[in-house]
Image: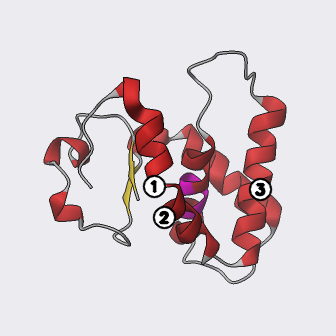
Amino acid sequence: MQMVHDEENWEYYSAAVVKLQVEFVKKLPALVKDLIRLVKYWRKTYIPQSGSKHVPPSYLLELLTIHAWENANRPESFDMKIGFKAVMEVLKNHQNVCVSWEDYYRRNLIPSRYIHGEFKIVLLQ
């Protein structure tokens, strides 16, 4: 699947990959999924939702949470407070985040401008 930078049709691209997104998260340990739920609850409860473009999308938060867990060497068990803090640190330092997972594509097929700094945050899955 090749996507073009097209903000008007982004929801169609997003809908087209929902099944892959669900499968990607489904295989994670239950504790990581609980942490994802906590982060989404935080977003819903503490970030104003009224039309702000600064509200991170739900799936972006899922990916950042997975990234934080992977950076901690994929622990089988962890304290939820420590995990939540790690995700908040990733969000705080989002300018330095560049993550990719090769479950559904190969990184070498991604245009280099997406990987080498033209964009502030790049999360590919």
Where residue 85 sits in the image (x, y, percent)? 71, 52
Q: Nearer the viewer, mark 3 or mark 2?
A: 2
Measured Cα–Cα span from mark 1 to mark 3: 20 Å
User: How busy is the neighbourhood of tag 3: few (under 14 within 10 Å), some, or many (20 plus)?
Assistant: some
Measured Cα–Cα span from mark 3 to mark 2: 19 Å
Residue position marked by numbered label 3 in the rendering: 37
Farthest-out residue, top:
51
* Rendered residue at 80%/69% (across/down): 79
Residue position marked by numbered label 1 in the rendering: 17
Stretch of the chain drawn in magenta: 63-67
* Rendered residue at 35%/34% (across/down): 120
Local SS, label 3: helix
Residue position marked by numbered label 2 in the rendering: 20
What scheme was used to colour the molecule? secondary structure
* Rendered residue at 39%/30% (across/down): 9
Q: Residue flagged by tag 1: what amino acid is it?
A: Val
The N terminus, quarter of image:
bottom left
Q: Residue flagged by tag 3: what amino acid is it?
A: Arg
User: How busy is the neighbourhood of tag 1: few (under 14 within 10 Å), some, or many (20 plus)?
Assistant: few
Left or right: residue 82 versus residue 72 is: right
39 relative to 82, above or below: above
Q: Residue flagged by tag 2: what amino acid is it?
A: Leu
